[in-house]
């Protein structure tokens, strides 16, 4: 699928009359970032911006990046309705270059790409972290196909903790440590069994 085809697919998906994912933040993003002091946050492939909006509500300076214009428009409307300040950026995360060393938190939630583009986005996300900043990566785990529910069915674009941590550990120009790398369960309303996600949390450290 080309980038144009992918954008068109998501524009159609977000063209539904109601919010696709709801406005509550992803539970794992909230679990990791909720206790942290507010700073500057970047949500890559943000969709309608539910995580960026939630962070803004906590006092973070949030930036939401996505290539689906109608998703961002819906997020903008939600921000206006609730008096929240979010910077909305219309861009493909495969081309977007965030400001290096500028963000106290970077979120990548349910962005499913094959190995090389996934590594490129992870690299850009890691470089965007300020010293001490936190990277949260969450997405459907490869075991979700057989044992979970929902999500993509192509194993090449799904996550494992090892796929994410190995990609991050190959980034020689970024000094960071892995804080969490595990499979987590998320209950949905689609089936009795939970969905299975990969969750990786990493923290940028001071360069030696």
Image (spheres, rainbow, N blue to C red):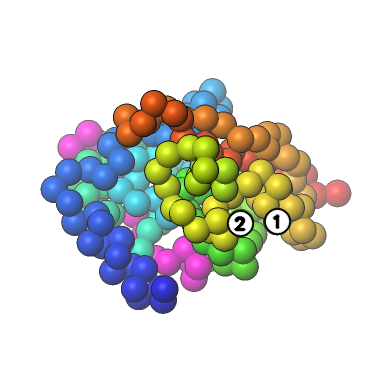
Q: Earlier in the sequence, mark 2 or mark 1?
A: 2
The residue depicted at 42 percent of the width and 35 percent of the height is: 26
Q: Residue beneath label 2, please?
A: 122
Q: Is residue 62 above or below residue 127?
A: above
Q: Position of residue 64 (x, y in %)?
A: 39, 51
- Tell me the element at label 1: helix
Task: Residue 67: say if magenta.
Answer: no
Q: Residue 9: x and y, percent?
A: 30, 65
The residue wearing badge 1 is: 167
User: Please, which residue is most extreme toward the left here?
Assistant: 17
Viewport quadrant of the N terminus: bottom left
- 2 and 1 marks in contact (CB < 8 Å): yes
The quadrant where residue 206 appears: top right
How many circles with numbers are drawn on the protein? 2
Residue 102, compared with residue 37, is above or below; it is: below
Label 2 and label 1: CA atoms lie apart by: 7 Å
- Residue 91 locus on image (x, y percent): 39, 66
Front residue of this view, candidates 183 and 69: 183
């Amino acid at each position: 699928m080309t980038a144009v085809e992918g954008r068109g697919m998501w524009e159609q998906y977000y063209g539904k009359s109601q919010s696709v994912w709801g406005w509550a933040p992803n539970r794992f993003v909230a679990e990791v970032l909720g206790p942290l002091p507010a700073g500057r946050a970047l949500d890559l492939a943000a969709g309608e911006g539910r995580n960026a909006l939630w962070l803004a509500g906590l006092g973070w300076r949030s930036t939401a990046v996505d290539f689906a214009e109608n998703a961002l428009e819906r997020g903008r409307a939600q921000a206006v309705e609730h008096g929240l300040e979010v910077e909305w950026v219309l861009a493909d995360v495969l081309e977007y270059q965030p400001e290096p060393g500028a963000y106290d938190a970077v979120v990548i939630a349910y962005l499913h790409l094959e190995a090389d583009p996934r590594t490129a986005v992870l690299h850009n996300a890691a470089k965007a972290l300020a010293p001490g900043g936190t990277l949260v990566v969450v997405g459907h785990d490869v075991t979700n196909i057989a044992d979970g529910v929902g999500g993509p069915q192509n194993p090449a674009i799904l996550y494992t903790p090892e796929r994410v941590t190995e990609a991050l550990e190959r980034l020689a120009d970024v000094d960071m440590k892995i804080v969490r790398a595990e499979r987590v369960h998320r209950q949905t309303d689609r089936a009795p069994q939970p969905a299975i996600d990969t969750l990786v949390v990493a923290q940028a450290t001071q360069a030696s």
